[in-house]
Amino acid sequence: MTPALIAYWVITILLFGVLFALARNFKMRLWARVLIGLGLGGAMGFAFGGGAAGCADGVACVPASSKFIGDAFVRLIRMLIVPLIFTTLTAGVIAMGDPKRLGSLGGRAIGLYVGTTIIAVSLGLVFGLIFRPGIGIDLSAVGPDAVASVQGKLALAEASGGVVDRLLAIIPQNPVAALASTDVLAIIFWAILFGVGILMAGERGKPVASVIESAAEAVLKVTEIVMEVAPYGVYALMAWVISTQGLDIIVNLGKLAMALYLACFVHAIVTYGSIIRFVVNLPVRRFFGGIVDALAVAYSTASSNATLPVTIANVSENLGVDKSVAGSVLPLGATINMDGTSIYLGLIALFASQALGIPLDAGDYLMIALTATLASIGAAGIPSAGLLLAATVLSVFGVTAEQSVLIIALIFPFDRLLDMMRTATNVTGDAAVAVTVAKWEGALDEEVFKAKSVA
Ligand code: ASP
């Protein structure tokens, strides 16, 4: 027990007490407590990271000692993914009443997902041209251990099969196994068909319909319970991330980080903001205010899959999106819609071309945009998935396999802070599309959107 460790824990316990009192005695809203947890965790990570607190030279940073609280929170929300997708999506299909509505809903959602992704990749390329993050990068500094570890991760990612296999895997051979392995797309497939089956069964389907509907309500209540842990979990995750990589990234990949953060902000505010303001005619601040919890959880966990239960709860409860839309559009979005990841892939392509001195022509840009779009659709909503997919994008303009391993290994140790931002952007995109589709489908309660959301 070092003095720094004792000090860290004393302060942490005090701060947790304050967070608890804010909830209990001052009835402070959850989103505000989550934001406070995020800020305090970041500040503590900064204060206790490196230097006197001793996380240099391979010694674990002091704040890493509370990471288990963050891990427990992540486990708690991951626990909700399967029951929540299955019940809300099946209940959603039942609530639609007519299976034909699924076609227009799905078509509109996918159209918006692809459209915003194309804008995102273009933004990534533009910011890469403006910031030139790869100029002056020294690739010879990457050590053999880092290269070997990335090679292993890439081999694992490739072993997951080609495009056709992955498409086939959407059809679960055993729905129970799909549920057991949190196979989101396969669960979506089964839940939709099951909902349609219940509708087709008419009167005789009613008993199971009401069981599923009440189960969906109950699981959303469990989400509320779990979210009470969010301020503490987010604190612990932030303290850990900032203490382990806060300053390093600024020193090593400052321009890349700046370009990504700015591009993501611009995409969130200009692209999604315009959609909310001009396409669905709703106040933008309330949109962002309503999804603060989801944004904080996405930012601290770097996983849009893990955030999914919070996104569903926020979008349906704060933004008035009907559960039939939230339950179907959001799980699909968490799996295929990743605009932050697309921005990142565009940026990394330019980073690599600049670091390696490979000139790009118009055809290369087009190929980068195309592969980055497809790669982001294929990316899983888990930490670092986007970076591992960069190899596919780099290969289209003549980067060799060895060179892309070098580029990825250079970024990998600092990826988490970048991942956090792109995940928050991914989740914002899912929510914006859910609101838009709900409005178009007549499934948006504007009273709730305007009244209940925060900010
Ligand atoms: N971590 C991101 C997500 O879960 C994916 C990525 O690595 O870009 O949304």
Image (cartoon, rainbow, N blue to C red):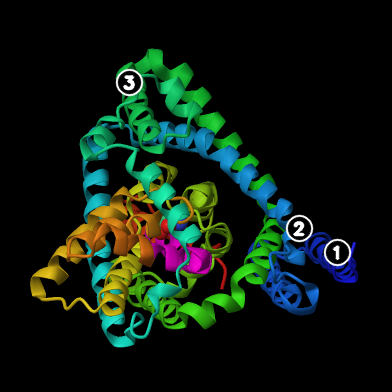
Asked if residue 314 is positioned above or below residue 140 in the image, the reply reads: above
The residue pinned by badge 2 equals: 66
Residue that protrudes farthest toward the top in the picture: 204
Left or right, residue 68 beside residue 6: left
Total numbered badges shown on the rendered structure: 3
> Considering the numbered disc 3 on the image, is that residue within a helix, a strand or a loop?
helix
Asked if residue 441 can be seen in this view, the reply is no
Q: Nearer the viewer, residue 353 or 67?
A: 353
Left or right of residue 447: residue 43: right
Q: Which residue is mark 3?
A: 197
Secondary-structure class at tag 2: helix
Give the structural element (helix, strand or loop) at label 1: helix
The percent position of residue 447, horizontal first and vertical second, equals: 47, 60
Type of amino acid under label 2:
Ser
Q: Residue lying at the far left in this picture: please name it.
A: 363
Bounds of the magenta span?
A: 408-429
- Amino acid residing under circle 3: Gly
Can residue 7 be seen? yes
Task: First in sequence, mark 2 or 1: give its number.
Answer: 1
Q: Position of residue 14 (x, y in %)?
A: 87, 67
**The residue at label 2 has a CB less than 8 Å from ligand 1:** no
Residue depicted at x 44% and y 68%: 411
Q: In which image quadrant can residue 175 be found?
A: top left
Cα–Cα gap, marks 2 and 1: 8 Å
Where on the picture, by quarter, is residue 19?
bottom right
Q: What is the distance, in whole Å, between disc 3 and disc 1 at their CAs?
A: 54 Å
| Marks 2, 3: nearer the viewer | 2
Look at mark 1 in the image and give the residue it sits on.
Answer: 9
First reached walking from the N terminus: tag 3 or tag 1: 1
Classed neighbour count for the residue bearing mark 3: other residues with Cα under 10 Å, few (<14), some (14–19), many (≥20): some
